[in-house]
Structures are given as C-alpha cells and as structure tokens.
Amino acid sequence: MTTKTERISARVSENVYHTLHHAAVLVGSTVNQFLIQSALERAQAVIKEESVIYLTGESAKKFLDAIEQPPAPNERLKMAFRIHKERL
C-alpha cells in the first residue's frame, strides 16, 4: 500500500533555524520531524478551537430554552422565508 505524500518547504533566518534545530535535538528528532509534529499539533488545536463552542451554564440554559421554546417569527424572518420560497 503506497501513501501519497506532499512536500512542504520554508526559508527561515539563521536564528530561527538554530532555534528549531536546538529544540529538535532536545526531543531527539530531526528539524523536519520536529516541524511536522509541531505544525500538526498546532493545526489540530486550531481546528478544535474553531470547531467547539464553549458556553457558561447560564448561556447553555438560555440556548436550550430557545431551542425548546423558540420565539415567534418576526416580520423580517417571514419576509426572508417568502423571498426564499419565491426563488425556489
């Protein structure tokens, strides 16, 4: 089974490279391995941060109450439904 791979490259200043190299040596990996692992961890954290909504207890209660007992549609919402229906 063959897995397709993609190439990532970046040019960095000498100071940045030395810092990355130093960190890689400390964890026993190559600079490339260190970069990939670090970038992957950060990417996963960003995806989680942007995908999850955190609510306080009070906010969660208001949200659930609004789902269970939604307010009646106002005129703007009614108009939006009519426009949408006409476009279909």
Image (cartoon, helix red, strand yellow):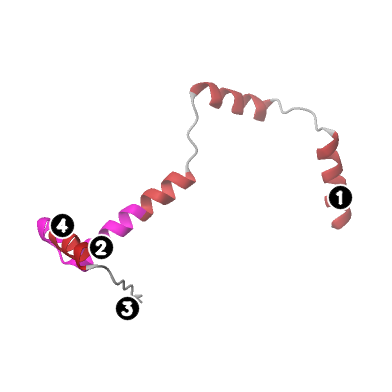
Circle 2 — which element? helix
Q: Mark 4 points at which residue?
A: 23
Tag nearer the camera, 3 or 2: 2
* Image position, residue 57 (x, y; %): 49, 22
* Image position, residue 71 (x, y; %): 75, 27
Q: Residue at x 83, y 51 (%)?
A: 84
Alpha carbon of mark 1 to alpha carbon of mark 4: how far? 58 Å
Horizontally, residue 6 falls left or right of residue 87, namely left
Q: Tag 4: Cα neighbours inside 10 Å, few (<14), some, or many (≥20)?
A: some
Residue 26 against residue 59 in the figure, above or below: below
Q: Name the residue under label 2.
A: 35
Q: Mark 3 points at which residue?
A: 2
Q: Which amino acid does label 4 sit on?
A: Ala
Q: Which amino acid does label 3 sit on?
A: Thr
Answer with mark 3 or mark 2, whichever residue precedes in sequence: 3
- Write down the region rendered in magenta: 24-42
In the rendered image, residue 26 lying in the magenta stretch gets the answer yes
Alpha carbon of mark 1 to alpha carbon of mark 2: how far? 51 Å
Report the number of numbered marks: 4
Alpha carbon of mark 3 to alpha carbon of mark 2: how far? 23 Å
Q: Residue at x 18, y 59 (%)?
A: 19
Answer with mark 4 or mark 3, whichever residue precedes in sequence: 3
Circle 4 — which element? helix
Q: Quadrant of residue 22?
A: bottom left
**Which residue is at the front of the view, 1 or 45?**
45
Residue 86 against residue 53 in the figure, above or below: below
